[in-house]
Amino acid sequence: MSDSRVLSYNFDYFEPATLETALDLIKKKGSRIIAGGSDLLVQMKTGNVQPQALVNILGLKELDFISLDGKGNGEGNGKGLEIGAAAQLYKIEENDRIKNHYTALFEAVKCLGSTQIRNMATMAGNICNASPGADTLPPLIVFGAEAVIRKLNGQGAIAERRVAAANFCTAPGTTVLTEGEMVTAIVIPPPGEGSGSAFKRLSRVTLDLAKISCALYLERRGETCTAVRVAIGAAAPTVIRARLVEEALAGKKISKKLLSESAALVTGNISPITDIRSTGQYRNQVAPVLIADTFEQAWQRSGGKVLS
């Protein structure tokens, strides 16, 4: 591409017709996958990245799908939810079954950027950008999601591996992907019986990245929390599990007092920094409150009573 009014250097641009062709193109050094481009194009304009070639997968119909076979919440145990790498976020936002059964994920997508961004951006792109404040990563982690990763092997056949969402990002801007690999889908198991989930985040303004975020998934039996997973965004180099909080709540009869004491343990898991959006001190102070609020919402969605 030349004579660009936006980008100051030349690069090749491809729109492959098949997944095999796309995988063959990204084997070349300096190639990058582009779908919505809401993160990558900004980085190219600022000069932070300069790929030699862009491979646009947004037109690949085989990657543009949402499959929801498992109803979850005791209504059936299917295969769960699978989202193709070329499915834009607005399609998730408009899916009532995702809203009802994967509520935390729906809430994260709903608050991600503007309508224009959600009309172009993809979930695979959001996690591949590997921002510590990525909105979709916390709910994917608490739901036990996996990224489906594919590449062409030495014989020209497609090889596949899966990586848990919790292990996908290794540092800010860095993932487990190696040269020639791409995420083709994200798979999420069906929620368990008596479950509830929620996502909350704090930001300076609605369209800004999160100061701090929290996704929480729990399973309840009576007044007892039988299982809980908590993920915190924008409070460490990567989105992390608040395992100290989880251990304090799992298997316990839940009360307001226990929840408050357990949520306070999150400071032993996070390592927030001070940046242009917030201070480390503020993030440390607000994290327990955010966890408690998110837990209470998920608890009530599971059918639990208001805590006292």
Image (spheres, rainbow, N blue to C red):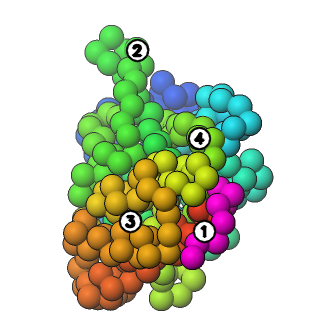
Which mark lies nearer to you, 4 or 3? 4
Residue picked out by circle 1: 297
Amino acid type at circle 2 is Ala
In the picture, the disc for residue 232 is 3
**Magenta span of residues:** 301-308
Tell me which residue sits at (74%, 36%) in the image. Answer: 75
Which mark lies nearer to you, 4 or 2? 4
Q: Position of residue 48 (x, y in %)?
A: 28, 67
Dot 1 or dot 3, earlier in sequence: 3
Tell me which residue sits at (53%, 87%) in the image. Answer: 205
Circles 3, 2 touching at the beta carbon (< 8 Å) = no
Residue picked out by circle 2: 157
Quarter location, residue 68: top right
Front position in the image: 291 or 270: 291
Amino acid type at circle 4 is Gly
SS state under label 4: loop
Q: Quadrant of the N terminus?
A: bottom left
Q: Position of residue 272 (x, y in %)?
A: 25, 76
Residue picked out by circle 4: 192
Q: For residue 302: magenta?
A: yes
Which mark lies nearer to you, 2 or 1? 1
Spatial CA span between label 2 and label 1: 46 Å
Dot 3 or dot 2, earlier in sequence: 2
Spatial CA span between label 4 and label 3: 21 Å
Circles 1, 4 touching at the beta carbon (< 8 Å) = no
Q: Is residue 240 above or below residue 115?
A: above
Mark 4, other Cα within 10 Å: few <14 / some 14–19 / many ≥20: many
